[in-house]
Amino acid sequence: MPIISWEGGKLTKEQKKDLIRRFTEIAVEVTRVPAKFYSVVIREQQDENLGFAGETVEEMKARMAKG
């Protein structure tokens, strides 16, 4: 069974539903493998657990909010 995995920041319930639906639709379109065989896994990370350029996302958001 194919597994589609997404890892990133927090999402709303609606965003998760949309990602699962759209990832599956695109995978079926490209591969012609029926949707019932796909699993989608979403792993959410806290902002303090993600970083770019030596800075956590939490720090980046705080800095950007200041202007």
Image (cartoon, rainbow, N blue to C red):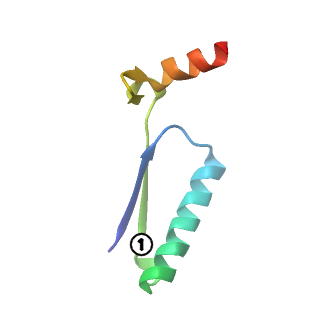
Q: Residues within 10 Å of mark 1 (few under 14, many from 20)?
A: some
Tell me the residue that label 1 is attached to.
38
Residue 2: quarter of image: bottom left
Q: Return the residue found at the far bottom.
A: 32
Vertical placement of 52 versus 25: above or below? above
Q: Where residue 58 sits: x, y (%)?
A: 50, 21
Q: Where residue 59 sits: x, y (%)?
A: 49, 17
* Mark 1 residue element: loop
Vertical placement of 65 versus 14: above or below? above
The residue type indicated by label 1 comes to Tyr
Q: Return the residue found at the far left.
A: 1
Residue sitting at x 58%, y 16%: 62
Q: Where residue 60 sits: x, y (%)?
A: 52, 22
One can see residue 37 in this view: yes
- Placement of the N terminus among the 4 image quadrants: bottom left
- State the count of labels: 1
Residue sitting at x 57%, y 22%: 61
Q: Is residue 45 left or right of residue 20?
A: left
Q: Is residue 1 left or right of residue 7?
A: left
Q: Is residue 61 left or right of residue 65?
A: left
Residue in front for this viewpoint, 38 or 52: 52
Vertical placement of 24 versus 44: above or below? below
Residue in front for this viewpoint, 15 or 67: 67
Residue sitting at x 42%, y 72%: 38
One can see residue 33 in this view: no
Residue sitting at x 67%, y 15%: 67
Q: Where residue 21 sits: x, y (%)?
A: 58, 66
Residue 17: quarter of image: bottom right
